[in-house]
Image: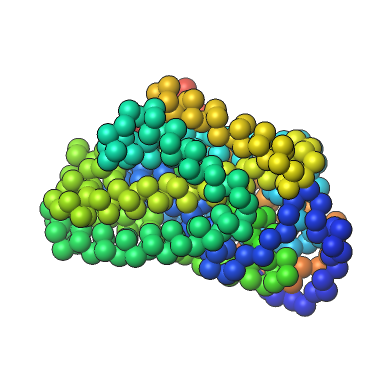
Amino acid sequence: MEYTESENLETAEEENGTLEVRRLTFTEAVMLVVGATIGSGVLGLAYASRKAGWPVLLTWLLAAGFLSVASMLYVAETALRTRRPLQLSGLAEKYVGKAGSWLIFFSVGATSFCSLIAYITGCGKIFSTFLGLPLEEASLLFSIGATAVVWLGLKVTGAAEKFLGLGMILMLVLLVGASFLRARVPLDEILYAHWTWGIPVFNIAVFCYAVQYIVPELARGFRDRPEKLVPAILGGTGISFLILSLVPLAVFLMLPGKEITEVASLSWGRALENPLFYLLVNFFAFCAMLTSFWAIAESFLTNCIERLGFRSERDIRSRALCLAFIVIPPIFLASSGLVGFVSAIFSAGTFGGIIMSVLPVFMLRSARKKGDQEPCWQCGWLAARPIQELVLVVFLASGVYALLSMAGMLPKGW
């Protein structure tokens, strides 16, 4: 990875366009990555990997993490080679054409809808449990509150992510520590590895790391300090890896596989056998899904503004229409009970994650030939041809497996 000097060639007119440029602090940017990554995926990992085992999960988190981070950094270099602040679909249109742009828009949309369904379902269950509300009312209440923050824009979303993200880290330290001290399952009994059940876990890991859509948001927030973009991505994904690894480990220490529920916070909290820890586990789960809701909805909002030709991100009517398009369908699907929690994660990870991981390879190749400017940072060895080919082969193979599984030719694995 390489840093070089570059001139700031943007004019105010070029910067503004349809998307606002709002300054992010480094911590806000890191927590936007963490918030986007640590959502329903972290809560579904223990359930999805209960048959494969924690060592298998850890292996896939490392593999998917490395390849997904490489893909994210391809987007980062592409954004740094572009003068105007563009979203992922805008970058795709500029460098791989309209077909690529619509593919990216579809992948962001598919990931967003499936993710929001999972968050609304998960948080609705938590609200329903603690407030005694019917599930439909609890889900609607969560959706209204979460959407209100997204309405206020990137800067407010980033600040909210920062405070809740730091709180989540503190809660995690307490919860993991308590799980190790109160472990009901011996450590040697959770270190099994059944690779027959391991492949589908990779798709869940892909979903957790499939946050390429957040990179252009960070690039927008760092227009005046582009050298901060890559450290923020690496810092956010590093913290995310630790959380994604430790939460399932803590759940496995407290619960045998047959007792782990789809939304692991519910069974994990009960297993700790303390009302305070039960409350803390569920508040952590709620915050994890809320921060991810904010990051995904904010990014999909700007993708809609850009790809669907709305006037401006600042236009009230445009924001209202886009947010209605983003939030109302997931609320309906979550309330209907037609989409299962883990199934939604699997679908999102398979299709959205694979498209978002593969297309940046071609975007980077094109940007290096016809980008607007020389970037202050380049991928270096991470963009070597063998690494690019590995990204393509692994993610495409994951997609083929998923299609075969959906056709009933392979076991789902959970």
Q: Quadrant of the N terminus?
A: bottom right
Q: Is residue 11 left or right of residue 187?
A: right
Q: Residue at x 40, y 23 (%)?
A: 337
Q: Compared with residue 24, is residue 244 higher up or lower down, i.e. above or below?
A: above
Name which residue lies at 73% across and 70% down: 224
**Residue visible at 20% across and 58% down in the picture:** 179
Q: Residue 251 versus residue 18: which sits nearer the camera? A: 18
Which color scheme is applied? rainbow
Q: Can residue 193 be seen by looking at this rendering? A: no
In the displayed structure, would residue 141 be above or below residue 3? Answer: above
For residue 38, say whether it is visible: yes
Instruction: Name the side, left or right, on which 82 lies relative to 161.
Output: right
Image quadrant containing the C terminus: top left
Quarter residue 258 falls in: top left
Q: Is residue 378 above or below residue 400?
A: below
Of 59 and 107, which appears nearest the observer? 107
**Residue drawn at (30%, 48%), measured in percent from left and top?**
282
Question: Residue 364, how many percent across, how many down?
Answer: 73, 55
Count of marks overlaid on the render: 0
> Where does residue 177 sit, x and y in percent of width and height?
23, 64
Query: Where is residue 153 drawn, in percent x and y?
Result: 63, 51
Q: Position of residue 329 (x, y in %)?
A: 54, 28
Quarter of image, res 267: top left
Image position of 227 (left or right of 265)? right
* 57 vs 9: above or below: above
